[in-house]
Amino acid sequence: MIGTSNDSSQDLFGLMSRLYPLCRSITGDGVRQTLKILQEYIPIEIREVATGTQVFDWTVPKEWNIRDAYIKNPEGRKIVDFQACNLHVVSYSAPIRKKVSLEILKAHCFTLPQHPQWVPYRTSYYKEDWGFCLSHQQLQELTDGDYEVFIDSSLKEGHLTYGECFLPGSTDDEILISVHVCHPSLANDNLSSMAVASSLYQQLSRLSLRYSYRFLFIPGTIGSITWLSQNESRVSRIRHGLVLACVGDAGSITYKRSRRGNAEIDRAAAQVLRDSGAEHRLTDFSPYGYDERQFCSPGFDLAVGCFMRTPHGTFPEYHTSADNLEFLRPESIADSISKCMGIFQLLEQNKTYINLNPKCEPQLGRRGLYSSIGGQTDGKIRELAMLWVLNLSDGTHNLLDIAEKSHLDFGLIHDAASNLSAHDLLKEV
Ligand SMILES: [Zn+2]
């Protein structure tokens, strides 16, 4: 529908480069700073929900912030420094300043022996603890002695912060786009979906829309639970939704269906991916993954699928320092944006029509509908699309139903419907 110009993909890389160093977590100033930067691109409203607020079976946690952290070796030299890489501290680590033996230090250190140069990403949100993440190589170089561990963090009453952005269409029916904003310096798993969502807002805001679009920039799990808990009365307006995650790597697209499995969003995504001719994967819903887990919990069962490239946990760089800006591919970001826009375009255009000349086929040649297609090499397929649209437009089949039954591209079916409507052979229901 709309391509991504080089200018805008450079913009998105500029955005991601600015967001990359921020130490995000499920609460705290890293999320606030992230949302403030995103506000330069799209009109996000920043919302704050107080610690202790009950949200279904959960409670909004204490707010965590961190200023500094390091490990000093027995000679007093900093060997692990939060300022150099925010992955070095286990997210939600309690404050600590003391000397510990190598043995105790090791019990609080996390590494990746299979990738000895990389630093892992670890969290301890709901169990108060402290810890460091470092490369396995670094851990192996540590010698006996007393190490100074210092984490200047705070875990206090505060708020959970999230961003919300609403783009009104001509109806109250909504399409939800949700991304998580709780990971620190990780690029594909976090920043790519923030950048793609921002670009989708910008592109959609230039169009005349049937649906209203609601964008959520939320901490994973607790953010969607909080939003659903505080917006339960509005949830019924959500007709379709996509959770976006890991949308910038070199892999092909994976679409994970909603819990319903055959919702319009599931079929729209499958159709757009099929029509694109590009390699892709469709997977069934499972209660493991991103915030689709909450949107698709049985009490809501929303038509929300998950749009990814390589799924979480299936690429070695996942949740490690190797998921950095170099891991992202500009062409993948652009392709993710264009496929999502294709899905939204399909949903916008997926209308139901009624054939105004249902008794036998209308004479297309008399109306110039053959001649208008005669010069085109794909004339036959366009004619076939018209026959399918005329035959199935009985008020019970929408254009996506017709595309699926005919095995023709949605774009062809939509063009046929527009053409037939212009010749008064079809009317929108
Ligand atoms: Zn993650």
Image: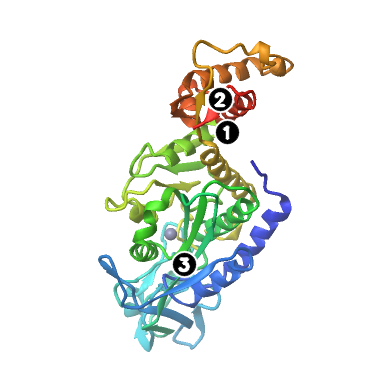
List the residue tagged with mark 1: 276
Instruction: Kindly indicate whether the residue at mark 1 contacts the one at mark 3 (C-beta within 8 angstroms).
Output: no
Q: Amino acid at mark 3?
A: Ser
Q: Label 2: how many residues lie within 10 Å, few (<14), some (14-19) or many (20+)?
A: many
Between the C-alphas of marks 3 and 1, the distance is: 41 Å
In the figure, is residue 396 to the left or right of 40? Answer: left
Of the two numbered discs 1 and 2 on the same chain, state the one appearing first in sequence. Answer: 1
Instruction: Look at 59% across and 30% down and name the residue there.
Output: 411
Q: Position of residue 214 (x, y in %)?
A: 49, 57
Is residue 313 visible to us here? no
Instruction: Look at 44% across and 27% down and name the residue there.
Output: 397
Q: Quadrant of residue 7?
A: bottom right
Is residue 54 visible to us here? yes
Instruction: Look at 64% across and 27% down and name the residue there.
Output: 422
> Which numbered disc covers residue 239?
none
List the residue tagged with mark 3: 135
Q: Amino acid at mark 1?
A: Ser
Between the C-alphas of marks 1 and 2, the distance is: 27 Å
Identify the element where label 1 is drawn.
Answer: helix
Of the two numbered discs 3 and 1 on the same chain, state the one appearing first in sequence. Answer: 3
Q: Quadrant of the N terminus?
A: top right
List the residue tagged with mark 2: 426
Instruction: Look at 57% across and 13% down and name the residue there.
Output: 362
